[in-house]
Amino acid sequence: MYDKTLTLARLDAAQARIEGLGRNAANREFSANLQEGMAIAGDILQALLASEGKESDPNADLLALWKTLVKGQPHWNTIRDNCRELVYYQNCLAMDRADALPPQPQKMLLHTLRHLYLYARSHTEQSQEETS
């Protein structure tokens, strides 16, 4: 069953984690921040999938979660590039190509996570009321 209040609470918890990441970003390596950011993005997508009653693998990568989310709901294409950007950062680090990252990767990571959160939050706020 869809529980709008629960979904908003899960999204707000993700936002608090994003802000915490932002406060501590300068004190940590980008790879650690990216790993945490990927987990936050995954949690946002998991909350959205749960709100739409879609099953997902809790161990699925970000793009697999997005693909499950977008099926039958094309408005979720809005966040596709954000998901792909995060995966790009992950791939750059995995291939020892930190030189291919944007000039300020910490700021871009936070910007991307905030965009995911804001779109998910505004969509949830505008969605139909709770059903039981």
Image: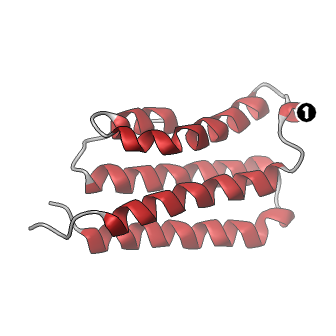
Q: Position of residue 109 (x, y in %)?
A: 71, 52
Q: Residue at x 28, y 63 (%)?
A: 127
- x, y (%) of residue 121? 44, 65
Give the class, few, some or many, for how many residues have Cα within 10 Å of label 1's Cα (few <14, many ≥20). Answer: few
* Residue 59 is at least partly visible in this image: no
Q: Quadrant of residue 72?
A: top left
Residue at the spot x=47%, y=72% of the render?
Answer: 12
Q: Is the C terminus in the top left, top right, bottom left or bottom right quadrant? A: bottom left
Question: 38 and 80: which one is in front?
Answer: 80
Give the percent coordinates (x, y) of residue 68.
34, 35
In the picture, measured across the screen, residue 60 lies left or right of residue 31, that is left
Q: Is residue 107 visible?
A: yes
Q: Secondary structure at mark 1?
A: helix
Q: Where is 130 relative to 100, above or below?
A: below
Number of disc labels: 1
Q: Residue furthest left?
A: 132
What residue sits right under mark 1 in the picture? 99
Task: Look at 20% across and 70% down and name the residue there.
Answer: 129
Task: Classify residue 35 as left or right of residue 54.
Answer: right
Q: State left or right for residue 33 relative to residue 8.
A: right
The quadrant of the picture occupied by the N terminus is bottom left
Which of the two residues, 60 or 130, is positioned nearer the viewer here? 130
- Up the image or down, 2 lies above or below 74; here it is below
Q: Position of residue 25 (x, y in %)?
A: 79, 63
User: What amino acid does circle 1 point to?
Assistant: Asp
- Colour style of the rendered protein structure: secondary structure
Residue 31 is left or right of residue 38, and the answer is: right
Q: Residue at x 69, y 33 (%)?
A: 88
Residue 17 location, quadrant: bottom right
